[in-house]
Amino acid sequence: MLWSGLLLVISTLFLAFLLAQLRLRLFLGKPLPVYGTIAGFTLTNQLGQPVTLADLRGHVWVADIIFTRCAGPCLKMSRQMKDLQQKLPDPNVRLVSLTTDSDYDTPAVLKNYAERFNADPKRWLLLTGPKNEISNLATNSFKLSVTEKKPEERETPVDLFIHSTLFIVVDKAGVLRGVFESVGEGIDSEHARNQILAAVRRLERE
């Protein structure tokens, strides 16, 4: 628990720095910062189809990490993703939700979950795959923290993970350009959504 707590503190401080930098650039109309390049991956979507980084080339995309058994913020995050799908009329923009619970979240489970939010499978990809690949992608490329809780630390049977509640924005070349907090105390979800939309539109023009 001590290590998990330390990771969360570090992640929180890093997030505060990123958000301050990003807000300033959005306000000043400057190009969005570069936080790193997304590493190549091959995962599976809710239709059982393979999805690679190459499939997202040429698209601006927004991503988060969730799991379908989540009793915490995941449902709210998915409702926000649904809202983004409705507010982004450009069919070229993609939305990506990566599951942390790949052993349970098969394509069929993700498909049922996606249908709850009217997810367009051509635009909103819910991805599963090998646990190690998902963990590496989430932490090293998306810069999102994911920690699986030990059985003795779980308060309920579905209290499985501690994970970031961030949305990230990736440009057409597969470069991470935006990090936004989506839920939590003091977070205005409408303001967060508008910032994500502004970042997407900025990157669409690049």
Image: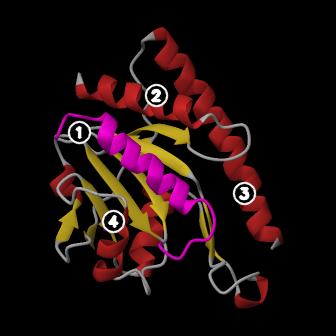
For discs 1 and 2, the disc positioned in front in the rendered view: 2
* 179 lies above or below 29: below
Label 2: which secondary element: helix
For discs 2 and 3, the disc positioned in front in the rendered view: 2
Label 1: which secondary element: loop
Q: Quadrant of the N terminus?
A: bottom right
Q: Quadrant of the C terminus?
A: top left
The residue where tag 4 is placed is 114
Structural distance between the alpha carbons of marks 4 and 3: 29 Å
The residue where tag 2 is placed is 194
The residue where tag 1 is placed is 172
The residue where tag 3 is placed is 8
Q: Nearer the viewer, residue 90 or 65?
A: 90
Structural distance between the alpha carbons of marks 3 and 1: 30 Å
The local crowd at label 2, few if under 14, some if 14 to 19, many if 20 or more residues have their Cα within 10 Å, is few
**Of callouts 3 and 1, which one flags the residue occurring earlier in the amino acid sequence?**
3
Say which amino acid is labelled 4: Ala
For discs 4 and 3, the disc positioned in front in the rendered view: 4
Q: Residue at x 72, y 57 (%)?
A: 8
**Of callouts 2 and 3, which one flags the residue occurring earlier in the amino acid sequence?**
3
Magenta stretch, residue numbers = 68-91
